[in-house]
Image (spheres, rainbow, N blue to C red):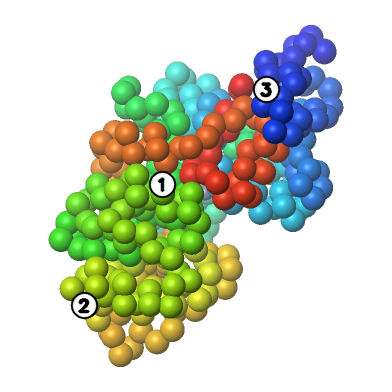
Amino acid sequence: MRAPGRPRFPGAYSPARNESYRAPVPYIGEEQDLKQAAITGKRQCAIIDRPDPKVRENFCLVKITSAPMCTEYKAYADGERTETIGHEAAGVVVEAGAMGRVKPGDRVVVMPQYPCGACELCRAGDYIHCEHGVDPRAICGSETGVATYAQYCIKQDWLLLPVPEDVSDDHAAMACCGLGPTFGAMDRVGLAATDCILIMGLGPVGLGAVINATHRGARVIGVDGNAYRAELARKLGALAVLDPADEDLLKQVKSLTGGNGADCAVDCTAVPVAQKRCVELTRRRGSVAYVGWGGGFETGNMIPGGHSLHGCWHWNLTAAPRMMRTIRDCSRQIDTLITHTFPLSRLADAWELQLSGRCGKVILHPWE
Ligand SMILES: [Zn+2]
Ligand SMILES: [Zn+2]
């Protein structure tokens, strides 16, 4: 608790530096403990004061230094009122759980969800598919801690991945949705260096897929109609970026793949018509991974071509060392992927930017 009235983080009350941006988001409430974001209406948000989270058992308190932004802008655009926003983060351990897996001062990536940690899936590293999720607020007796557009969060110690010294917090946080879902997808389809992979949709997740695929030596065909993102994908190493509106899309893909179609495809759109096209654009006996979700689902007929389909949410935790190596190896590409960073006080600007589509991965800094 601090003296009332003193700004807790600089910049929260300062006027917008760039006049084309909106004013800083309003600050609501008494000076109390942690600050976190809230959606207060259609295209309206605020920074609110909430009590600092408490931890118990194997839960740790993490000071969030980097909060990558995902699809929360959709709730902002729709005006879905909530103060539990965000699921991606990296930061510093402030209070460690009883098991001693991490200690205060450790820099960590915060993995998503609150899985049980005991079932077969959790023990095999596939915690993301756990069906026995726990309620961290009930366990810890805490009102807060489950949002990442916030200054602190709480997480089980085994879901905090140590960050190597030479990797920044923003880069390490790409182990969440920046690189995570497509890293898992490429493991699932067994992407080989000799393969040509089609990435359907080049939003931040699809752009992360370009990084994962090129790092594994594969050739990449991207598909997206957004010129800004097509350019980013080319910078990240895509061999070609095609327009999904082109009538001869199939012909173009075939001419780039010796007449066969891509060896595999990853859908990052969640758009049924695009999901279906992934099968059409992939060669016979090829594999398609579905990463984007939430907008319906359609695969078309995969029987004539004998395609294998994979539902991919995230990556297996046992691959953590390989994930961190990928992040370190792809440092320059990740600098291209992360196009913007914003202080929490400029959250509205960040969301408006995401709605414009003229960005790659965007990161919030909750303490700036
Ligand atoms: Zn479990
Ligand atoms: Zn995400």
* In contact (CB < 8 Å): disc 3 and disc 1: no
From the image, tell me which residue sits under label 1: 232
Indicate the quadrant containing the C terminus: top left, top right, bottom left or bottom right. top right
Task: Give residue 193's position: percent from left, percent from top.
Answer: 17, 56
* Residue sitting at x 19%, y 52%: 217
Q: Secondary structure at mark 1?
A: helix
Q: Is residue 207 visible?
A: no
Indicate the quadrant containing the N terminus: top left, top right, bottom left or bottom right. top right
From the image, tell me which residue sits under label 3: 17
Q: Which mark is residue 259?
A: 2
Q: In the image, is residue 303 above or below residue 185?
A: below
* Residue sitting at x 34%, y 50%: 234
Residue occupying the far bottom of the picture: 304
Give me the C-alpha separation between circle 1 and circle 2: 27 Å
In this view, the residue in front, 355 or 168, is 355
Residue occupying the far left of the picture: 194
22 displayed left or right of 359: right
Q: Is residue 358 visible?
A: yes
* Residue sitting at x 63%, y 50%: 355
Q: Secondary structure at mark 3?
A: loop
Give me the C-alpha separation between circle 3 and circle 1: 26 Å
**Which residue type carries mark 2?**
Gly
**Which residue type carries mark 3?**
Arg
For marks 3 and 1, the one nearer the N-term is 3
For marks 1 and 2, the one nearer the N-term is 1
* In contact (CB < 8 Å): disc 1 and disc 2: no
* Residue sitting at x 31%, y 23%: 166
